Image (cartoon, grey):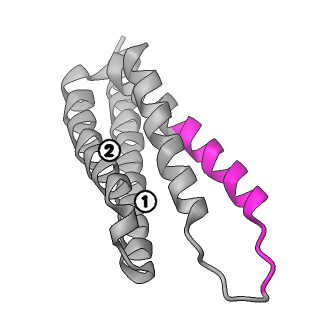
Amino acid sequence: MKIHQFVSLALLSLTLCACSTPQGKKGTVKKTGDSLVQQKTDGKKCVDNFDMLKGLNYEAFNQYRLQFDKINNSHAYFKSHEDLMEKDPKELMTLTLNDKLNMICERVKSQAFLEIQKKMKNISQI
C-alpha cells in the first residue's frame, strides 16, 4: 500500500506542476478542468498498473519503481529551484518530466499486459 500512496502523490504533484505552467497564448481560453480530470484518470490507471505489476512480476515492478523514483527526485529538485528558472526552461523541464513519467507508465502498462499473457498461456495449457 505504501507504493500506491507514493505513486499517487508523485503523479498528483507532476499533474499540478504541468497545470501550473502557462502553455497558452494571452487571450486564449484554455480548458484546464477537462485536462486535469484526464490527467487524474491517467494517473489512476498508472497506479493501478503499478499495483497489478507488483503482484505479477515483483522484479519488473522494482525496475520501473526505480525509474519512477529518479523522475520524482528530479521533480523535487526542479520544484526546489523553480524560482531561479526563467519561463522557457521551466516549461521545458515540466514537459520533459511529464513525458518521462508517461513513458514509464506506458512501460508498466505494457509489462503488466505481457505478464497477464504469460499467465493466460499457462492457463490455456491446462
Which label was assigned to residue 72?
Answer: 2
Residue 117 coordinates in the image, percent (x, y) = 38, 32
Residue placed most toward the observer, 105 or 30: 30
- Location of residue 63 in the rendering, given as x and y in whole percent from the top left corner: 19, 35
Residue 60 lies, with reference to residue 39, above or below; the image says above
Taking the magenta stretch, the answer to whether it contains residue 37 is yes
Q: Nearer the viewer, residue 92 or 45?
A: 92
Residue at image coords 46%, 23%: 5
User: Quick check: 49 above or below 96?
Assistant: above
Assign the magenta stretch its main secondary structure: helix
Residue 41 figure quarter: top right
Q: Earlier in the sequence, mark 1 or mark 2?
A: 2
Left or right of residue 51: residue 76? left
- The answer to whether residue 120 is left or right of residue 17 is left
Q: Residue furthest front?
A: 83
Amino acid found under the numbered disc labelled 2: Asn
Q: Secondary structure at mark 1?
A: helix
Distance CA(mark 1)–CA(mark 2): 11 Å
Residue at label 1? 98
Question: Which residues are the magenta region?
Answer: 28-45
Q: Amino acid at mark 1?
A: Asn
